[in-house]
């Protein structure tokens, strides 16, 4: 994207007023999508995002600037703005860049940008019409096939000059069903750090459509969930969003470094049931949230956050690490060059345990089975959360019974961690987009089936 010599000159200007760290982040991203609604292709979108972000540190001060002008003049001007904002002083560091290659463990067979649009439309139609034709009560279907080709270059005053190319593909089918005048929606949204081979070799788009429609049909015929405190069984895959939101954000340096996390100062202490081991791992081949390097040029890591209930580590970026006295963990991420990098998750999950799924269900006399979780909100300082259950069922006498809608789970992250008293063996992950101060980024969430001994269930 940019030459090493140009990056050295730009970083030199950025550090000219006394910075002790300077960084350049360049990006060129191709963002493409095909959308369907009303049984026809509604839109074909093709966008390019390109620009450069420059950041400088001096002690615990940080200044960031960005530009879309990637000419030498434009970059030097941007660097000077950052340097001037940092203050007056003299250059204290020498900029010498050395190219780093960290390898790529995410093979791509079919680069989406090189595939004909017609091929993408065919894949999308297979999922769309499978959902539309699933059941007569399906009233509406929407579908999107998206692919992202995200190219980054990171250069910094520590000598790093490295690039990464991140190709991701995802299919999103949403269906709406109507029964007795009541409508409910269902969705299925698989994705990976792969090309179109994800949907030609591994995942049948028609299965994606049928799953979205199945969920909508089941929930359209469901009664309302009763409210109360009860045991809840949360299934694997996207059920991991509970840990991601209610606990994961509280383990990021963006909260811990400023003393606003519920888990500040608790390294080495028990914060979860001994059955809980939680990991953030950006090195999983072809996983949706995986990266070869983070957006500060640090190689991706497998970070054990909680081991058998004991807090082992946080997720740390360079600036947060300065405040915490800790080394970066490969978790610095940003949506684009125009956002300021901070600590973020990659592929975050509760690891597999020893319990059988059948035993977990059988252990509940009366409670809720949350088969599919939805969105929610959380306060990282307190860990308080509220999450919707997209597909839920009542458990009676150890058996899954009638479906219920309108359920939500309410509690705190620290509370739920201690009350996870059964953990299944089958780990699966689901794909999502996580929003925070550095924008929206792709993250995997996951877990096996778990049981929470008691939690507040919102309903009627």
Image: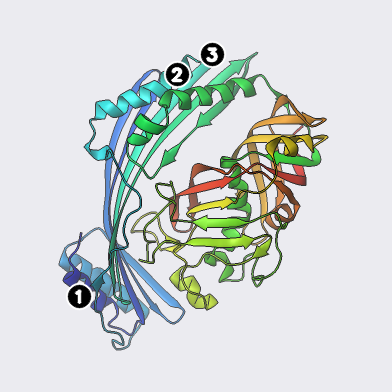
- Per the image, the residue denoted by label 3 is 135
In which quadrant will I find the C terminus? top right
In the picture shown, does residue 258 fall above or below 408?
below
152 sits left or right of 305 in the view: left
Closer to the N terminus: mark 1 or mark 3?
A: 1
Q: Quadrant of residue 275?
A: bottom right
| Most foreground residue, 182 or 216 | 216
Q: CA distance from mark 2 to mark 3?
A: 10 Å
Residue 24 location in percent, x, y? 29, 68
As drawn, the label of residue 9 is 1
Q: Quadrant of residue 336?
A: bottom left
164 sits left or right of 318 in the view: left
Residue 310 in view, yes or no = yes
Q: Is disc 2 in contact with disc 1, using a CB cutoff of under 8 Å? A: no
As drawn, the label of residue 130 is 2
Task: Say how many tags the image has.
Answer: 3
Q: CA distance from mark 1 to mark 3?
A: 63 Å
Identify the element where label 2 is drawn. helix
């Amino acid at each position: 994207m940019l030459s090493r010599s140009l990056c050295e000159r730009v970083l030199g200007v950025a550090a000219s007023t006394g910075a002790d760290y300077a960084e350049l982040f360049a990006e060129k991203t191709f963002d493409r999508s095909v959308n369907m609604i009303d049984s026809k292709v509604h839109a074909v979108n093709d966008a390019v995002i390109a620009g450069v972000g420059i950041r400088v540190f001096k002690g615990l001060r940080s200044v960031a600037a960005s530009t879309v002008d990637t000419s030498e003049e434009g970059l030097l001007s941007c660097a000077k703005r950052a340097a001037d904002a940092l203050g007056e002083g003299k250059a204290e560091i020498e900029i010498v860049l050395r190219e780093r290659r960290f390898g790529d463990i995410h093979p791509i067979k079919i680069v989406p940008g090189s595939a004909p649009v017609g091929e993408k439309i065919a894949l999308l139609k297979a999922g769309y019409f499978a959902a539309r034709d699933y059941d007569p009560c399906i009233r509406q279907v929407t579908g999107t096939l998206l692919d992202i080709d995200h190219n980054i270059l990171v250069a910094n005053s520590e000598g790093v000059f490295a690039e990464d190319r991140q190709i991701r593909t995802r299919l999103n089918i949403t269906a709406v069903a109507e029964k007795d005048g009541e409508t409910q929606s269902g969705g299925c949204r698989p994705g990976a750090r792969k090309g179109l081979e994800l949907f030609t070799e591994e995942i049948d788009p028609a299965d994606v459509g049928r799953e979205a429609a199945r969920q909508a049909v089941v929930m359209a015929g469901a009664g309302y969930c009763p409210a109360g405190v009860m045991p809840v069984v949360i299934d694997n895959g996207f059920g991991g969003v509970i840990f991601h939101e209610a606990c994961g954000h509280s383990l990021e340096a963006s909260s811990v470094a400023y003393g606003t996390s519920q888990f500040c100062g608790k390294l080495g202490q028990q914060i979860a049931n001994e059955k809980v081991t939680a990991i953030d791992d950006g090195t999983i081949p072809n996983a949706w949230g995986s990266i070869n390097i983070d957006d500060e040029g640090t190689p991706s890591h497998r970070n054990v956050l909680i081991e058998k209930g004991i807090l082992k580590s946080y997720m740390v970026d360079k600036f947060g690490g300065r405040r915490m006295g800790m080394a970066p963990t490969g978790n610095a991420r940003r949506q684009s060059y125009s956002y300021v990098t901070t600590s973020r998750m990659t592929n975050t999950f509760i690891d597999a345990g020893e319990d059988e799924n059948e035993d977990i269900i059988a252990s509940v006399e009366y409670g809720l089975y949350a088969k599919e979780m939805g969105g929610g909100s959380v306060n990282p300082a307190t860990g308080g959360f509220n999450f919707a259950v997209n597909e839920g069922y009542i458990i009676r006498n150890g058996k899954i019974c009638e479906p219920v809608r309108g359920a939500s789970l309410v509690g705190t992250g620290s509370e739920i961690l201690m009350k996870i008293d059964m953990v299944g063996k089958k780990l699966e992950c689901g794909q999502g987009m996580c929003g925070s101060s550095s924008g929206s980024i792709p993250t995997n969430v996951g877990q096996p089936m778990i049981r929470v001994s008691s939690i507040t269930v919102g309903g009627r």
